[in-house]
Structure formats: C-alpha cells, structure tokens
Amino acid sequence: MLLSWVNLIFFMVRSSTYRTSKYSAKLVGDVIKNRIDAQRDSMVSQVGSRFADAEAVEVATKNLLTGWGLSVIFVPSYLAYSRECMGILNKHTGDIAHDEICIAHDKWETRGLDSYYMQVIAMDVHSVDISDCT
C-alpha cells in the first residue's frame, strides 16, 4: 500500500501556480545576493586563471594573424574560431576534441575563413592537428 502512495506522489502533476510561486521565490533579490556573496571569492579565483588562459590564446592567435597580414576585418572571426577551439578543449580530449574542432573548422570555413589559417591556429595555438579533416 505504501508503495502505491509513494508512486502517486512521485508522479503527481504540479500546477502552473505552484511552479510560478517556486520560481518567484528563487528570484528574491536578497536570496540571490546572499548566494553570490557567499561564493564570490571562490568564483573570482576560479575565473581568474581562465581569463589568463583566454588572453594567452587570443594573443597567440592575434600574433599569427598579424604575421600573415590578414585584413583586420577578419580578425574577430578567427579569434572566435580560436575561442571555440579553446572551449572544445576545455570540455573534451582526444578523438572527441579533434572531431569537434573539425566540425568547428567546417562551420567557420562555410562562413568564409581560410582553411589553412584555421589549421595552423588549431596546431600552433591549441596543439591539435586537424590536417586529416581539412
């Protein structure tokens, strides 16, 4: 008997009014402020190293682009590609990272970026050889 009662509670449909009240309670300014205040120092210390990594990737990519003499109009797109590679490498490793960067390469090539430049960025900045998928 108890099992059927638990199942009834577990599979019970919640009303939109109940959901709205729970969501509204989460958005109280003091609650959000207290959560952020409690975790602020940890959040800042964690993001500090990530910002330094992002800067290093952008500087290395920008140096390559400057050396190639590319028009400044293309720089933001190549930086976006390089940041996407960095994001992929933060989430994946090995063959999955390689395949995801190949997918990003194809996407950005469709948007007009040069395949050779993206291949060099992937290799020199991110140490991923995508020559087999270009």
Image (cartoon, rainbow, N blue to C red):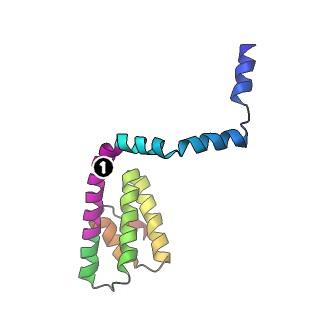
- The x and y percentages for residue 5 are 74, 19
Residue at x 68% of width, y 38% of height: 18
Range drawn in magenta: 40-60
Report which residue position mark 1 lands on.
44
Q: Quadrant of the C terminus?
A: bottom left
Residue at x 69% of width, y 28% of height: 10
In the picture shown, does residue 86 fall above or below 107?
A: above
Q: Is 111 placed left or right of 60 in the picture?
A: right
In the picture shown, does residue 104 fall above or below 115?
A: above
Residue at x 25% of width, y 80% of height: 66
Choose top left, top right, bottom left or bottom right for residue 8.
Answer: top right
In the picture shown, does residue 36 fall above or below 100?
A: above
- The x and y percentages for residue 73 are 38, 84
Q: Is 38 placed left or right of 106 in the picture?
A: left
Q: Quadrant of the N terminus?
A: top right
Residue 93 among magenta residues: no
Residue 47 among magenta residues: yes
Residue at x 46% of width, y 75% of height: 109
